[in-house]
Amino acid sequence: MTAHAFDTEITETAETLIGPWRQPRQMLQAQTYDAHASIHDDATAQKLGFKGGTIEGPTHFSQFAPLGERLWGRAWFETGCLSAHYRSVCYEGEEVQAILSKPLPGTSQCQIQMVKRDGTEVLRGTASVGEPHAATALEARLSELKPLADPVILRDVKVAHTSKRQTVRMAFDQIMGDLYPFSLRQKLAVITENSPYYSGVDNPWGRAIIPMEMLSVLVQYRSKDDPLPTKGPAVGLFADQEIRLLKGPLFEGEAYEVEREVVALSGSRRTESAWARTRVFDKAGTMVATMLLNMATLKESYAPYEEEYRQLYGAGR
């Protein structure tokens, strides 16, 4: 017999599904990239004006899984999609709550948001299954982006740049590298919403499945083996992220191939952003999942930014 996917307590109203308050754990204190600490390291984050090391955005995706499963059942694990714009950072110890607004009759996409106790919005976006026949939150954002003007950190990055295919896998006790210095088993010990589906065969597929938040880790696992030609060292953070299952779920221990394509470059007063879509293929060559990620690099974290801007574009910005 198949176990229940989640025992999460969900509050249901006519319009919404609301998850419980949770305190996500921060597991990236030891993360390194470009041979330096990241935004998830307290000292690095504080230098850039944050209170401390931030919780990585996709950690929050786990809190939406029981809501998606309540709404759509098995389809959630096979063709589910979360598409989110990260609005504010979250620190370990803070409580957050996932809220899903039920879809209109006959549609398969709805609005999601996550809030802190004081009402601060951590993320907003859409959840869907299958082909929702409407733009996801990030598809809509992409269509409205202004192109990046006067790039410094991303001046050598071009739209349509595509990485070589890489083989990735995630086994229970495999440490996922410098970017993710922990294993799936360690994550499952502290994940906000655990499920027997994640740890064994007691599910419709007869194999342990990878939680959606860990698909981000799987997809990014070897990204530094074929990096974008960005200037650095500089500190980046996830600003927007969409994970979509096409023929899911993805399985623990299974080998997949990934390829990454730059689909847009954008910017803000403080950041330069590269938007990359990663496609995930199974061993038969079938595309089984995609991830769209906006990695926003903080201009002030790149030491020669102002000087190089002047060299490239003349007057100060």
Image (cartoon, rainbow, N blue to C red):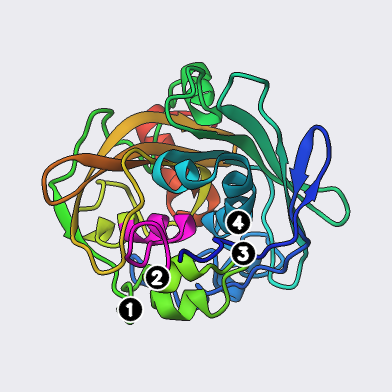
Q: Disc 1 marks which amino acid?
A: Ile
- Viewer-proximal residue among 13 and 202: 202
Q: Say whether residue 235 is visible.
A: no
Between the C-alphas of marks 2 and 1, the distance is: 7 Å
Numbered tag placed on residue 180 in the rendering? 2
Count of marks overlaid on the render: 4
Q: Which residues are magenta?
A: 202-218
Identify the secondary structure beneath mark 4.
Answer: helix
Q: Disc 2 marks which amino acid?
A: Tyr
Q: Residue 20's quadrant in the figure?
A: bottom right
User: In the picture shown, does residue 307 fall above or below 185?
Assistant: above
Residue position marked by numbered label 4 in the rendering: 60
User: In the picture shown, does residue 300 fall above or below 55?
Assistant: above
Identify the secondary structure beneath mark 3.
Answer: loop
Q: Are marks 2 and 1 in contact (CB under 8 Å)?
A: yes
Residue position marked by numbered label 1 in the rendering: 175
- Viewer-proximal residue among 131 and 40: 131
Residue position marked by numbered label 3 in the rendering: 54
Between the C-alphas of marks 1 and 4, the distance is: 21 Å
Q: Say whether residue 195 is visible.
A: yes
Task: Classify the position of the C terminus by image quarter.
Answer: top right
Between the C-alphas of marks 2 and 4, the distance is: 16 Å
Q: Disc 3 marks which amino acid?
A: Thr
